[in-house]
Amino acid sequence: MIHFNEPPFTGKELDYMRQAVEAHHICGDGVFTKKCHQWLETRMKTPKALLTTSGTHALEMAALLLQIEPGDEVIMPSFTFASTADAFVMRGARIVFVDIRPDTMNLDETLVEDAVTERTKAIVVMHYAGVSCEMDTIMGIAAKYGLPVVEDAAQAVMSGYKGQPLGSIGDYGCYSFHETKNYSMGEGGALLIRDIANRDRAEIIREKGTDRSKFWRGEVDKYTWVDFGSSYLPSDLNAAYLWAQLELADEMNEKRLAFWNIYLEELTGLERKGCLELPVIPEGCEHNAHMFYIKTDNIEQRSQIISFLKERGVGAVFHYIPLHTVAAGRKYGRFHGEDRYTTRESQRLLRLPLHYNLTEADVHKVCKELKAFYKK
């Protein structure tokens, strides 16, 4: 069976976790957490990075740092995971959904400005499949109206836009290290902070509302409860698991890109025949091969392909029922403008297996079975 996903494992994870145990420090902000922080800050060119217990919690921290309040509006795409909206809904915000571009499945930057109102408090972009949104335009709109930008870069670790790492462009960048991501700590994430002036408050929120981080740096002689917060820092055991992968980040990225390129080369013939559509990578976007998807004619054909592949030992899935079409989306948000592409394109999209443990033979088999379906 070729599984759709398997959590990445490089071989050093258990050794590093054992080292954390033997150091008698398995709670948050241990040696391996600090290694991960330094790697993220250096590699992503960001003043401050903080590991979190999930990508969701990174988004929640961003919402807290932006002081989102009831009645505020937050602009984002509807084609995204629930966490993108949840983080702001929990603060009382009303979500304003905007249509996507059919080529990248990202927020349509040309529709954002029309969605801005006097109640707009933030713009949230999601870099789908590790392919960047058109950030120049979005950042220009944000500057024009004095709005912060949050990057949901859960799928975009090691991706870039015109030479800038995704997650480092907006005011806050949010990564996920869930087991389905390119680099994993089981459950986990990270918050990237563009303005170092926001570091102290971010650390306080992350450390249960205390200034413990300052205490450990010797900046205060005791730590106390100074503001509201929660426990957003992961165990150093999780960070140790992640560190084993960040050490090999380039190697892992190259392997995924190689698989992605095989899919592209093998399936281009089917696209030329009009059988399916393949992903688009706009100029200036450096992607991380987070996923490879195809677009079918319609939802019925997609279901047929899933069944066909399953019978032949290949796992393939779809995802993201557009948020504005479901109960919570209707309760907590509204769609601005016309839904030209969000629903239609989401019903055509099908994800193929792509993970670190695949082999080239696996990828060729998936392509062979897809060709067999269309030949049939």
Image (spheres, grey):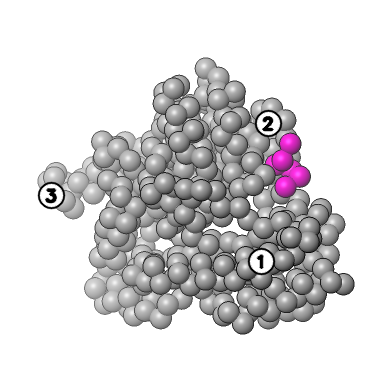
Residue at (59%, 25%) from the top-left corner? 115
* Residue closest to the eye, 186 or 301: 301
Residue drawn at point x = 64 percent, y = 41 percent: 101
Counting from the top left corner in percent of width and height, residue 55 is at 47, 52
* Up/down of 71 relative to 53, above or below: above
Find the distance from the CA under tag 1 to the CA under tag 2. 29 Å
Q: Residue under label 3, please give it.
A: 218
Query: Which mark is nearer the camera, 3 or 1?
Result: 1
Farthest residue to the top: give it: 118
Residue 118: x and y in percent read: 52, 17
Residue 294 drawn above or below residue 375: above
Instruction: Tell me the element at label 2.
Output: strand
Mark 1: secondary structure? strand
Image position of 267 with respect to 207: above or below: below
Which range of residues does the magenta coloring cover? 340-345
Report helix, strand or loop for mark 3: loop
> Which quadrant would residue 148 be assigned to in this image?
top left
